[in-house]
Image (cartoon, rainbow, N blue to C red):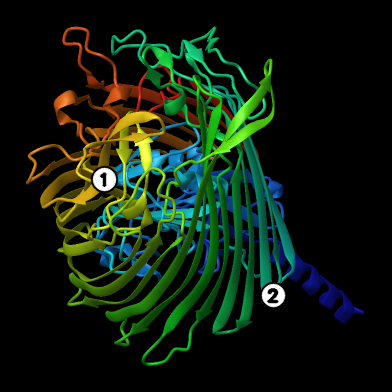
Amino acid sequence: MVRNITLLLFTFISLFAYAQEITVVDYDTNDPISNCTIFGEDNISFVITDKEGKANLTVFGQNEVVYFNHISYVEVEILKRQIKENQIFLHKKAESLDEVVLSVSRHKESLSRIAEYVDISQSNQIKKITPQTSADLLANLPGIKVQKSQAGGGSPVLRGMEANRILLVVDGVRMNNAIYRSGHLQNSITVSPTTLERTEVIFGPSSVIYGSDALGGVIHYYTKTPKISEEESSKVNFLSRYSSINNEFTNQGGVEFSFKKWASYTSFSFSKFDDTQMGKNRNHGFNDWGKVFEYSNNTNDFYNPNTVLNTDPSIQKNTGYEQYDFLQKFYFQLSKKTDLTVNFQRSNSSDVPRFDKLSEYSDGDLKYAEWYYGPQERLLLSSQLTINPDKKWMESGSITMAYQKIKESRIDRTFSSLDRSYQKEMVDVFSVNGDFYVQLSKNSNRNVSYGFEVAHNEVNSRAYGKTLSVSGNEIIGYSRDFVVQSRYPDGGSTYTSSAVYASYRQDINKKSTLNTGLRFTNTQLNAKWIDTTFITLSDMDIHLKNSALTATVGYVYKPNESWKLSSILSSGFRSPNIDDVGKVREKKGNLTVPNIGLKPEYVYNAEIGIQKYLNDKNFNIGWNLYYTLLNNYIAREAFPVNGSSTIIYDGEEVETYANVNHKNAYIVGSTLSLRGNISKFWNTSGSITFTKGEGYDTNKPLSSIPPLFGNFEVGYSKSNFELALNFRFNAAKKLEDYNLVEGIDNIEETPINSLTGEYYGTPSWQTFNFYSKYQVNNRVAVQFMIDNIFDQHYKEFASGVSAPGRNFVFSILIN
């Protein structure tokens, strides 16, 4: 009897002790948090979590308040008896400043060993920003400026370069394709920010891992990947957001199933945006700049020969659109050393009005009754096999195979005509890349990354015209067909790139790390034109081949644990794609025509960086300075066709332009940044970026060079509550600093100087923004934000659409 009572008592004590064991985990990643200090009200009793995030709370009473404290996380206080499911979730204060980087070498690498300037945004920071699109996310990152031609877009600028000089990557797959254009590129919005686990931005051409197109830098999106679990489990997440400035409604739902050998994550999001209202406070002094006094209400099936008076000119008519995004990922653990990730993504939009075109005037009247992008569609299907053979020649690696289908279309019609033109493009991209890693020494101070990449693009471009038949305001059909010039070669075109690379990283000693790399890239372009109605080329069937060897040498020196000094010498290469060589496009009386003699452009880059760490590496001040030499750089200029500088195109006489190679130019710039915790509850971040670019051969400014810009933020976090005040600013860009030849800087989108009758340039602007978040419990959080508190009117540099005015944003996040 005594033995049974003893056994029962022992069992009870064991169960009670087990019930007191809790696990502390990261709210966003579900990873365990080690070295978290847990203490009671008396500040005497305390325990610390082990490497699995576990700790026993038997030293605390059931009605005692327990505090969970970690230097990188917001402190949590809770009654012990209120702890449910034996788990405590902590939220990060600010990003760890000695964290792991995935994109530079395509495997995990400590930031302290990397010479490149890299900015990392993890899921908690992305959720804090709550961006409407991925372009809006990038606009909040240091060193990045985003141009917008319409609300449904966003063209990121890194170090004075944008569009096809910036490489976009999602989950290891190159998004850039053969028709990624120069000028402004709005495709960054086709990756939903609600599905992102992290974003990494590599500035400059220093990464040999990515090769062609990565002249200004690499933007690598990582979407959420499901995790396996010893016990079967399911998790659901939901986001709902409303923004007052354009009546945005976004809803996103995701579900994750975890099993011992496989896992699945499914996400679907839908966003609806109405017309955007601009700010009403015009400190710049231009009372009518950007206002929309009249607009077109023509649609695909509604006809109106007249413009419509806008009752509120601050509302930018024809900026609304809709978008949905779907993500499905499967993760399979095939063995202890092999796993497979299958990734399916689909993004689709409604028609997206081209606001700047619909606001264009000709002879005092609105020119276009219709100008919109048809639904932008992006489909990605990829499989990534990750292996860990642990051999002398390969410790780990991955092989990624992918297929992408991209559809774009442009539809336009002028007020003076019933002729509607259609241009439609479809691109199929097949790619495979292998990335491998091996340690050359047991203490991990020497390692090599090597790999290959092959991408093949098939471009189909067609165009046609239809004359509308109307009855009153109703479009009842079409009366005839007519010929329209295709945007790209109508006989079809292909673009293939293949490359091999190797990079070597060695810790020379405890204070110094050497980074080196080489990449050889080969490209082949084939294009064929058939129709000669508008343009006849000297060669209607072209075949171009280009190749280049690029290199990187970087050095990191850490005199002590609080300093990091880095320097880089690197080269980059971009081979002309189908858009560069073969595009036909009219803009404001200037017609871009093909140049089949176009050659590759090269950059040579030198930069230095300084990082100072404070507060146990939880606060950082960084400065980066670079000089980039562009050789044989590609820019648009006047280009005679058959000896004439003008031709008749679409019934109008237009001047002809083309992309041509120039000699040399330079871009110099610098970014000063800070980020981290300044006390237990207070944190701050900020950056300021300067850029200047000019042609050595032309002595004229380069396009896409933004004025001085930056931001500064102070935040407070305690227990379940967060708030922050943010200040963003942009200096003026004067008329003489614009490139007036290419048309990329859109000087016509700036106000008129009443004293000179010339364009003024971009006025300076500043905004204050407020953020707050309340964590209701471990599962539910609510956010409230005010963007542009003082309702300032402004336009981002080179943008055709005014920025949103005062915007109230309400969000609820459920896990």
Q: Secondary structure at mark 2?
A: loop
Query: In the picture, residue 25 is in which quadrant?
Result: bottom right
The outermost residue toward the bottom is 392
Q: Position of residue 193 (x, y in %)?
A: 53, 46
Q: Is residue 794 left or right of residue 565?
A: right
Q: Is residue 501 above or below residue 46?
A: below
Label 2 neighbourhood size at 10 Å, few (<14), some (14-19), many (20+)? some
Q: Residue at x 44, y 53 (%)?
A: 199
Q: Secondary structure at mark 1?
A: strand
Query: In the picture, residue 287 is in which quadrant?
Result: top left
Badge 2 amino acid? Lys
> Residue 803, which numbered label?
none
Q: Is residue 493 above or below residue 303?
A: below
Q: Nearer the viewer, mark 1 or mark 2?
A: 1
Where does the N terminus fall, quadrant-wise? bottom right
Q: Position of residue 524 (x, y in %)?
A: 34, 69
Q: Nearer the viewer, residue 110 or 764?
A: 764
- Mark 2 highlights which residue? 260
Q: Residue at x 54, y 29 (%)?
A: 419
Q: Nearer the viewer, residue 362 or 439?
A: 362
Q: Residue at x 42, y 54 (%)?
A: 489
Q: Distance between the Cα atoms at labels 1 and 2?
A: 58 Å
User: Disc count in the image?
Assistant: 2
> Residue 658, which numbered label?
1
Sequence-first disc among 1 and 2? 2
Q: Is residue 235 visible?
A: yes
Badge 1 amino acid? Ala
Query: In the picture, residue 496 is in which quadrant?
Result: bottom left
Q: Residue at x 42, y 13 (%)?
A: 365
Q: Nearer the viewer, residue 397 or 94?
A: 397
Q: Is residue 201 left or right of residue 75?
A: left
Q: Position of residue 434 (x, y in %)?
A: 43, 77
